[in-house]
Image (cartoon, rainbow, N blue to C red):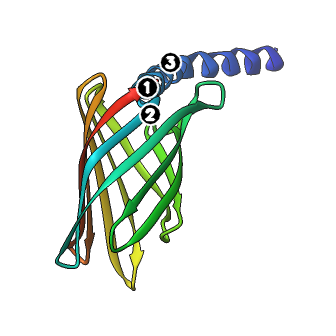
């Protein structure tokens, strides 16, 4: 009798978690669907970076491919920034099933190695943030992407150091191929 009662309680506990798991799956699935819309080759010939009182204009490229059986994206990005050099970066992003958010890992040849956390508020707007130390100060990087149509997105990246803007990068990217 005691064993049957334990089994009934175990089954009741498992059934109680089903709605929460379904809700988590639905949120994760929705975020993943929106993340995968980045798939393709994106370019801009008019990226702008402002830092240290200077402005740099350059072409910027990003190639997004799906990974892990369509459960994430891997993105290769590159640019030649006059006066700064070549940028070469790799990014890996997916949805964390426990918080339903996009976790975006970045590594590049200019010293970036960190994780952003963000989410799509709808299919047209994505925002993610990284918070960490830089030069012994609090650094916050916020990146937003706004889709103006299926093949055009506005990118804005703002980096602040101790609450003061340190870098601003903007660009309108166009998908040239899937």
Q: Earlier in the sequence, mark 3 or mark 2?
A: 3
Q: Are marks 3 and 2 in contact (CB under 8 Å)?
A: no
- Residue 61 picture location, percent across and down: 41, 46
Residue nearest the observer in this picture, 16 or 99 = 99
Where is mark 2, residue-wise? 41
| Residue pointed to by mark 1 | 177
**Residue 17 appears in which quarter of the rendering?**
top right
Q: Circle 3: is it few (<14), some (14-19), or many (20+) Cα within 10 Å?
A: few
Which residue: 58% across, 28% down?
A: 71
Q: Tag 2's secondary structure? A: strand
Q: Which badge, 1 or 3, comes first in the chain's sequence? A: 3
Label pair 1/2, CB-CB below 8 angstroms: yes
Left or right, 74 with respect to 122, comes to right
122 relative to 109 in the view: left or right: left
Snapshot quadrant of residue 145: top left
* Position of the N terminus by quadrant: top right
Residue 67 lies in what quarter of the image? Answer: top right
3 or 2: mark nearer the eye: 2
């Amino acid at each position: 009798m005691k064993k049957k009662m334990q089994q009934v309680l175990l089954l009741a506990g498992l059934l109680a978690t089903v709605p929460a798991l379904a809700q988590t799956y639905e949120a994760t699935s929705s975020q993943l669907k929106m993340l995968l819309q980045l798939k393709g080759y994106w370019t801009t010939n008019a990226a702008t970076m402002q830092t240290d009182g200077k402005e740099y204009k350059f072409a910027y490229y990003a190639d997004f491919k799906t990974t892990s059986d369509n459960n994430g994206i891997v993105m290769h990005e590159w640019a030649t920034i006059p006066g700064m050099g070549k940028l070469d970066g790799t990014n890996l992003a997916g949805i964390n099933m426990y918080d339903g958010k996009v976790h975006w890992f970045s590594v590049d040849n200019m010293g970036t190695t960190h994780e952003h956390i963000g989410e799509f508020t709808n299919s047209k707007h994505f925002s993610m943030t990284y918070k960490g130390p830089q030069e012994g100060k609090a650094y916050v990087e916020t990146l937003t992407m706004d889709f103006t149509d299926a093949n055009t997105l506005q990118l804005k990246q703002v980096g602040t150091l101790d609450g003061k803007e340190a870098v601003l990068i903007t660009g309108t990217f166009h998908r040239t191929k899937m």
